[in-house]
Image: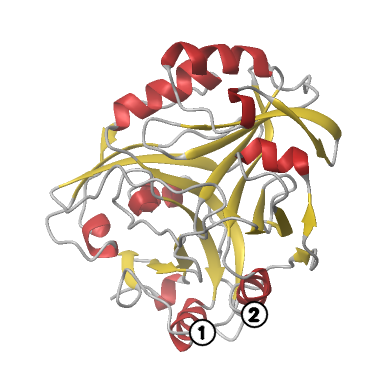
Amino acid sequence: MRSTCLAILGTVLACGLAAASADEPASDPPRVVSLMHYIHATQNVDTTTAFYRDVFGLETPPVRPYEGPGAARLNNAPGLVLRLSRPILPGEKYGFEFTEFTHVDRKGGQQALPTDPGAVELILHVRDLDPVYAAVKKRGAQVLSRGVSPVKIETSMGPARALLIRDPDGYLVRTIEVPASAALSGNIQAGTSLGVAVKDLDETVKFYREVLGFEVKADGSFASNPAMADLVGAPSGSEYRSASATFPGESNARIEFYDWKGMPRTPFSLRVPDPGAGGMVMGVKNLDAIVEKVKARGLATVTPSPIWFTPTIRDIFVKDLDGLNLELYEQVPKDAAKP
């Protein structure tokens, strides 16, 4: 049931990833109930999947074409063609979808600074940062961290080495070294999250609480954190405040929000097919009520209104306050399925 992530929609739903099982009535409080996967549009999906395999050891399924009209309808782009690969992240039920769109307008080469509102970071945990750093240098990938090398930051698990880079599409990837899990033999460890820079943390927290039903924990005060500034290459003396929420149904996956000050910031937003575009696909309850709330706030919807992606799945792409792409889908009872 995908798009950027849409292509996978049919596959995922068929797999029984029914995060939003619809046995409950339409009056059920509107909210997100599951994370299906993060999304990442690429210039060339083969190139990008090879990068993640070589640098992080991420095993990706073979790239395949998406068949069916759902992707074009979800992106409001007749004639759109999609190729994709969707690996399940180690130690998790959710995945990361790499997409390549053609026969649609794409604007490549656009890159945000990590502090720009709308900038997205994939946050990966690894057992050993050294081979990642070596592979990044060998490939000539851009390192944004100060000193072009790993820095030490404070995490919930204690001090850790971390590095911020760009992948071949300009997508930001924050890599943090954590204690290894005996259950996972590869370098990537559990707990892959998404980081988003925002324009106004208070408004973002309000949106995710009131529109999407997240339980967001917020730190309302700006503070200087030299280590984090070094990690993202922010000016010395800059400050930020943050908030975070765990995805419903997941113990490790989080979305983290960062509101920076002390530097020029340029709002940044990519469309779903644009190389480097990020976002996430989430199952919801009471999709219509959520869409009404999104539109009442004057926010954009990529899909004008929810579509039937399958006979029992309704789906839509919307934007949050900073232009992050959110694909929201709802599984409906068979007796309410599309005729």
Image height of 297 relative to 48, above or below: below
Q: What residue type is labelled 1?
A: Lys
Mark 1 and mark 2 in contact (Cβ < 8 Å)? yes
Residue 243 or residue 286, whichever sits in front: 243
208 left or right of 8 in image? right
Give the SS element for disc 1. Answer: helix
Q: What residue type is labelled 2?
A: Glu
Image height of 337 relative to 141, above or below: below
User: Is any atom of residue 177 visible in this view?
Assistant: no
10 Å crowding of disc 1: few (<14), some (14-19), many (20+): some
Nearer-N-terminus badge (2/1): 2
Instruction: Examine the image and state in which quarter residue 84 appears.
Output: top left
Q: Where is residue 336 in the image (x, y as percent from the top left)?
A: 41, 78
Q: Where is residue 83 in the image (x, y as percent from the top left)?
A: 26, 39
10 Å crowding of disc 2: few (<14), some (14-19), many (20+): some
In percent of the image, x 47 and y 68: which residue is there?
330
Residue 195 or residue 239, whichever sits in front: 239
In percent of the image, x 53 and y 58: which residue is there?
264
Q: Where is residue 77 in the image (x, y as percent from the top left)?
A: 18, 61
Image height of 305 relative to 251, above or below: below
Q: Mark 1 points at which residue?
A: 293
Q: Mark 2 points at which residue?
A: 210
Give the SS element for disc 2. Answer: helix
